[in-house]
Amino acid sequence: MKIAIVGGTGLLGRQVTAELRERGHDVRVLSRNAPEYRVDLTTGAGLGAALNGCEVVVDASNNSSRTAAATLVEGTRRLLAAGRQAGAAHHVCVSIVGCDRVPLGYYRVKTEQEGVVAGGPLPWTIVRATQFHEFVAGMLGAAARYRVVPVPRGVLQPVAVAEAARAVADAAVGGPRRARVGVAGPDVAAIRDLAITWRQAFGQRALLVPLPVPGKVGRALRDGSLTTGSPDVRGSLTFAAWAASRPRSETAARA
């Protein structure tokens, strides 16, 4: 099967690409910096040639900046149109568990993107994943540069990127479902507990400081809006086990 991975040079896209290639599929890596199939979702440049002959389009692109809507919403419209023109039979969109329940700008954009896919011209599957272990550690590590890590009250259910990638690959080869597929980690954990685990595993000494988050966003974090009790795919690698498995060189670099 010939499959295009938009955002194929990103954290998730690279692992989806590797997973599908291991299964014997012909995978094209699309991104603004791809070595062969360079595309720009904000303008549509390169999409026609890159998607030509592809049966499935996996959209693992990302943009969390102020221009997120230009990439994820308007870009999705361009991607769907180009996919239809190229004869694609299935569009797979990667999204976030609970994005429609958390009133933050980026999550609103992801919800709007889902709506564009569901109302678009191609048969579709939306794969919703919880936060990645790698994302949680990255956010904590970024804050730790200042020796203080703000920790909001709330719970998350992080999943390993590798396990999410397998679920996305399964969706890509499984045919369109016209449904959302939920992917989540094995455990729901308080953000503070995740921060403590991260600090111990990575040898950090940063001070964990409670961060009050008022209003609807705070309530959404506390009531588990970014978690799911019944995911379609449940990962097996806990955040603690993932953190403990990091190479010593990586641990030292972040300490």
Image (tube, rainbow, N blue to C red):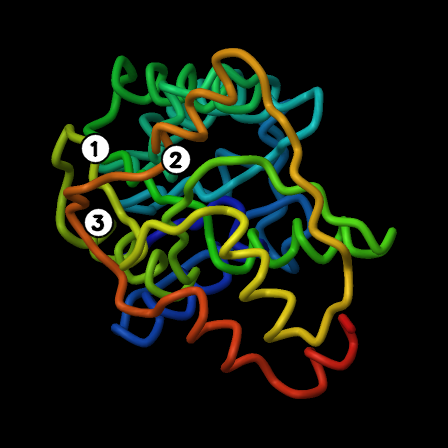
Please tell me whether mark 1 sits on a helix, a strand or a loop. strand
Count the marks.
3
Residue 243: percent from the left, percent from the top?
A: 52, 72
- In the picture of the structure, the residue carrying the numbered disc 2 is 95
Q: Which residue is mark 3?
A: 171
Image spot of residue 167 (x, y percent): 26, 56
Residue 77, quarter of picture = top left
Instruction: Give how far apart the Cα atoms at labels 3 and 2 are.
Output: 13 Å
Disc 2 is placed on an element classified as: strand
User: Relative to residue 248, is residue 218 depicted above or below?
Assistant: above
33 w.r.t. 121: above or below: below
Do residues under tags 3 and 2 come within 8 Å of each other at their CB atoms? no
Of the two numbered discs 1 and 2 on the same chain, state the one appearing first in sequence. 2
Q: Residue drawn 34% across and 35% down? A: 97
Q: Which residue is mark 1?
A: 180
Q: Amino acid at mark 3?
A: Ala
Say which mark, if any, is on residue 83: none
- Asked if marks 1 and 2 touch (Cβ < 8 Å), the reply is yes
The first of marks 3 and 2 along the sequence is 2
